[in-house]
Image (cartoon, rainbow, N blue to C red):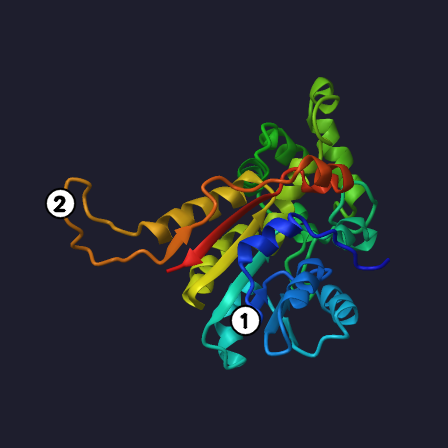
Amino acid sequence: MSFKHIPVLLDECMDGLNIKEDGIYVDCTLGGAGHSSEILKKISKNGRLIGIDQDTDALKAASEKLKDYNNVTYVHNNFYNIEEILSELDIDKVDGILMDLGVSSYQLDEAERGFSYMHDAPLDMRMNRDNSLSAYEIVNNYEENDLYRLIREYGEEKFAKKIAYFIVKRRKEEPIKTTFQLVDIIKAAIPARFRREGPHPAKRTFQAIRIEVNKELEILDKAIEDGVNRLNSGGRIAIITFHSLEDRIVKTKFKKLQDPCECPKDFPICVCGKKPEIKIITRKPKEASEYELEINPRSRSAKLRIGEKL
């Protein structure tokens, strides 16, 4: 299967990044290079793109798609390490950073990756297949309380306690090895009338396990702070999220970077000395248009927030 990923909120991202011809830009989640190819169209040969991805399949596909450009640097790493990555490339500051936090269509549709509840596959869900922690390890080895916590917090699943109980009960009989085995367990744990309404009954649990496998929320706060630290004045950071937990982290972090003062509200002047680092460009997050929703239903939950370095 080809590595395809329809770029979400593409026009909004390009406008939001305010791209300069000779600028240096970082795509922290290169994926299928949908966003990156548009960035490269807007910069000159004097500009530069740094494409980061922890998925080697993504890097291979992106390098093929962008083979006509010689101003791209490919990095197999996690954007959590953006400071180290830029230092190793001898880059001090950049003009724009893009983080698309969605799972690619390829990762969802390629059965062997184990991301999807729609395909039977070994439980995996690792974006970086060099990592040791997989969905199999979580489902078969986490304590029941830990499973409950992550399904409740990361999946926002109201039947988390029952799902965790059913998982532990089933794995005592035999290891849970495949996505469809897990789907059947989740369906058994959720009352029938709730299975008939709303999204697929396994959606929230699969989301929670994927977030845990890839430590998606843990890396985000630091990555934003480090990324902003590497922006030139006037440079912008654009972040696309796909669920409320991610969006809440981005929103909170942007607010803190715009107003870091820790002085009591009744102080007449700031004495803590903390200065704003960004200006928030998007008062409310940008969302997909009706047209985009028609051609790419997976954009429905996407939200784009943009900040500009002061």
Q: Depth check: 7 or 17 in front? A: 17
The residues tagged by marks 2 and 1 sit, at their Cα atoms, a distance apart of 40 Å
Residue 186 picture quarter: top right
- Name the element at disc 2: loop
Question: Residue at the location (62% across, 69% down)?
Answer: 43
Instruction: Check the image and name the residue furthest to the top.
Output: 193
**Could you tell me which residue is drawn at 75 percent across and 42 percent down?**
296
Residue 227 pos. (x, y %): 47, 63
Q: Nearer the viewer, residue 259 or 249?
A: 259
| Residue 106 shows in the view | yes
The kind of secondary structure element at disc 1 is loop
| Most foreground residue, 291 or 216 | 291
Residue 122, above or below 189: below
The spot of residue 161 in percent (x, y) is 58, 31
Q: Which residue is tagged 2? A: 268
Q: In which quarter of the image is residue 15?
A: bottom right
